[in-house]
Amino acid sequence: MRLVPAIIAFGWLCLRIFAADQPPTDWIDPDTGHRIVRLSPQPGSESLYFHQNACTADGDKMVITTPQGIATVNLKTRKVEQIVPDAGKISGLVVGRKSRQVYYVKPNGSNLVAFATDLDTRVTREIGKVPGGGSLMTVNADDTLLAGSFVESGETVLQKPGESKGDWMRRRLEAHTPMALFTLNIKTGVLKTFGHSTDWLNHVQFSPTDPSLVMFCHEGPWDLTDRIWIIRTDGSGLKAIHPRTMEREIAGHEFFSADGKWIWYDLQTPRGENFWLAGCEIATGKRLWYHMNREDWSVHYNISPDGSMFAGDGGADNMVAHAKNGKWIYLFRPFPPPASAGTKTGTNNLTQTGTVEVERLVNMSKHNYHLEPNVSFTPDGKWIVFRSDMFGPTYVFAVETAKAGQ
């Protein structure tokens, strides 16, 4: 008779082990009261980089990557469908602002080639070759152009075995390798280059509303570069968005607001001491800086579609803020709102400062920040999507911005 309790106990142990291997699909974070859902059923799945548009204009589908390639998540039903195969070979993913196309690059022999795949029919077509093994990261507002950057000589400064990322970035910056920006016509495949420079050009982003406006960065150690720039696709209008004014000042991880009127970025004056979520209104040059406490600093920030809220993905204690309790997904409600910047008489040429109301959404204490969560809002602004390895393998999750039951 003693065998029966032992069998039952063994069964319960097996069930618990199995359950531990299967992350929950829907739960309430006990530390925040916010509902979290797991959007990807498959381990090894990831959401896109924080400023890459991942959702259709209709807001019904979102693109993720899986070990098998590109997949979509139906944001209403949570159904996941595999769209494009070729795991590990696809890069530069972005979803069209108006079309239901996902654009990406993959190797073809010695070349990188850009493709477009319809998210509904899965019909795929080749667009054209990407020059010099460059990076493709963005699509413009009317789905006519792709853009990226490339090394004109075709030779890159590679990271050496055992070399730290910081040392490599400094060496890469000092190499002054000739580079350029490029556009690739989605319909014809015609390639055009512009913005030629010996600076390290990276993180190319099209405005979500202005089809010819491009933001890019001067890559390298952030305290050695004026990082954030804009330019037109015809090469005109080159402008630095945030020139540094003090030693060790850094600004980066820049992104557009959804209406295309503002550029936002992480600003530290100086590095690791004073933290801001900073914005510049493109048309007027007005500046609005929201002060961030050290504990609330995030690797990446993002803004809701209506511009009323920001999100942050937190950070580990070995990162630049050295926050002792910074592993959270955050929601920030800004005051004053961005729309009111510079409205006071005589202040248009001065930086306006504000504060944020901070709300913690997800406890990320079990997340390894070698994997950056990369927060982004869903098109309805009701959820924040992120990726996490809090259960071991990487999955795609979403947290509701409102507390459960509200």
Image: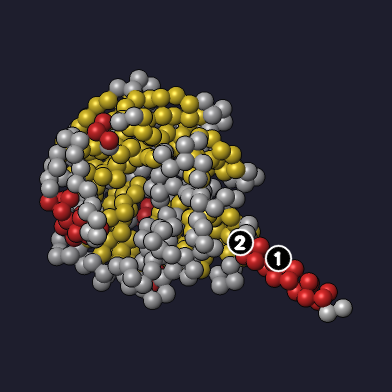
Residue pushed farthest top?
A: 188
Amino acid on which the number 2 mark rests in the picture: Asp
Pointer 1 residue? 15
Residue drawn at x 23%, y 67% is: 271
Neighbour tally class for label 1: few under 14, some 14-19, many 20 plus, Cα within 10 Å: few
Q: Vertical placement of 73 versus 243: above or below?
A: above
Tell me: 396 left or right of 160: right
Based on the displayed image, in which of its 4 quarters is residue 295 positioned? bottom left
Based on the displayed image, in which of its 4 quarters is residue 81 positioned? top right
Amino acid on which the number 1 mark rests in the picture: Leu
**136 or 272: nearer the eye?**
136
Label 2's element? helix
Residue drawn at x 50%, y 34% is: 84
Residue 378, image x, y percentages: 51, 48
Residue drawn at x 36%, y 66% is: 297
**209 or 298: nearer the eye?**
298
Residue drawn at x 54%, y 63% is: 391
Separation of residues labelled 1 and 2 (CA atoms): 10 Å
Label 1's element? helix
Q: Vertical placement of 377 versus 268: above or below?
A: above
Residue 399, image x, y percentages: 55, 58
**49 or 55: nearer the eye?**
49
Tell me: 32 left or right of 240: right
Numbered label tally: 2
Pointer 2 residue? 21
